Amino acid sequence: MAKAQYVLSIDSGGSGIRAFLLDRKGKIVERQYEKTPPNIPIAGALEHDPEVLWKALLSLLKKIQKDQQVVKEIAALGICNQRGSFLLWEKSTGKPLTPLISWADVRSHKTAEAMNRNPIWQIIRFVSTIVGRLTNHPMMIATSMLKFTTDHATCRLKWVLDENPELKQRCKKGEVLFGTLDTWFIYKLNGGKRHLTDSSNAVATGMFNPFQLIWNQPILTIFGIPSNLFPEVKDSNGDFGHCLPEFLGGHSIPIRASIGDQMAALFGHCCFEPGEVKISQGSGAFVDINIGPKAKLSRRGLFPMIAWRIDGKTTYMLEGYVATAGTLIDWLGKGIGLSDTPKVLNELAAQADDTEGVVFIPTPTGARFPYFNPRAKASVIGLSLASHRRHVARAVLEGISLSLYEILEGIQQDTKVKIKEIKVDGGVSQSDILLQCLSNFSDVRVDRAPEPDMTATGAAYLAGLSVGFWKNLEELKSLQKGYKSFEPKMDSAQRVQKIERWKKAVAATLSIE
């Protein structure tokens, strides 16, 4: 490892693929990007052409090769990807048989509804409810709570197979392979020799049991999905083969990490201990908390996910989601002319020390955890003739931060895992006022990353750790530099008053259909 100076990281998102080179100090020294916009052939569809994605990846690798000396000094490759999207391909040739069906594709909604009414599934849920109450076993409780939606790859895969009987027969004969995007890239980079994924991506499909760490045969049987489709599940820092020399200037680079995007960001922020949180704020906001080596869940609807599995040791997480953060701010500018960007909104909000009683509930597309009301709309409460745009702007930032606080508080109450610190990244996190509000309401320090691409950083950290490029987790922590911290400043009485007013405003908003 003496010659190696870099780790290569691939980050595939919903509209583009990025390639990054990180040096030994954890600094991104080069980044390349290829746009891969989705296809929307009909209403409700969201998919990608797998061959277009593969060509985009090859183009990125070609750009990385512009300096031949750099390619010689790459220690390992790590891959992270948007979770839950999948495709099927022919086992003998590697030819795609379906598009990559996005996690956000909703064409399988009728399949989800039908499977929730399935008599066998209803019996399983009933028995799990009884056993869960008697034993308090988290797997039984999780099973009793589970309702299928289009988010589950299970429903989308069943829909694909029901729509294509011939394809379903080929699956039963063992002629077809299933994979999320990491599996597809690993398969192609290895020349079709390795059919692999990691546990974080496997769990995100809804078909891998996070408690037993095996593909969920009862679910597959109920859905009529052949179990021979699925890849071998490795540790997140496992051996995923080698990139063929032809793809990287004649050099065979070991592939040593595969991980889901939000899990990668959690790892990139070095949230290695239970109670450490990261929030990625883009169009929406993903709130992920490390809950340690034991799977826990919220009875109010959050299921355990695998954050990563390193050297046979599993770390679990829970995830909450605010559907509109950046999207909401865009609407505030384009829709009603309040502000154009997070920076402008922050500047407007900075003109007011308080909201003067104005409360903004940021739920224009429904409320998620802990309320789960898909019909909810956004609202502004407490306006008076003295209210000004600056008060509304501040109320918007307070509203987003209070939504995040409620997710954190709900997880903390349901799991008894105390929140230690919060790391943030993404465009919306550039608002100092929002982060100060988040720190005030959650009553813990909030640290903003200097680097927006924490998913790629996490995948690189895992790959580098796997080959000894970095020694251990402590060395990775030492690479964290340039974070800006926000400490709690709000008086406790004011904090309680604000939160109580918020909860009343939420209740009033949810009461209006």
Image (spheres, rainbow, N blue to C red):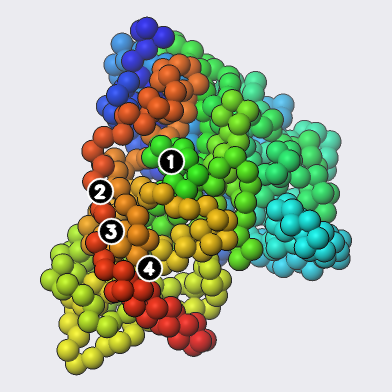
Q: Position of residue 321 (x, y in %)?
A: 48, 60
Mark 2: secondary structure? strand
Residue tagged 4:
402
User: What is the distance, in whole Å, between disc 3 and disc 2 at their CAs?
Assistant: 10 Å
Going from the N terminus, do you reach mark 2 or mark 4 first? 4
Mark 1: secondary structure? loop
User: What is the distance, in whole Å, between disc 4 and disc 1 at their CAs?
Assistant: 22 Å
Residue under the point 29% across and 16% down:
67
Residue 482 picture quarter: top left
* Mark 2 Cα shell of 10 Å, populated few (<14), some (14-19), many (≥20): some
Residue tagged 2:
485
Going from the N terminus, do you reach mark 4 or mark 1 first? 1
From the viewer's side, name the closer residue of 407 and 59.
407
Residue tagged 3:
488
Label 1 sits on what residue type?
Answer: Cys
Mark 4: secondary structure? helix
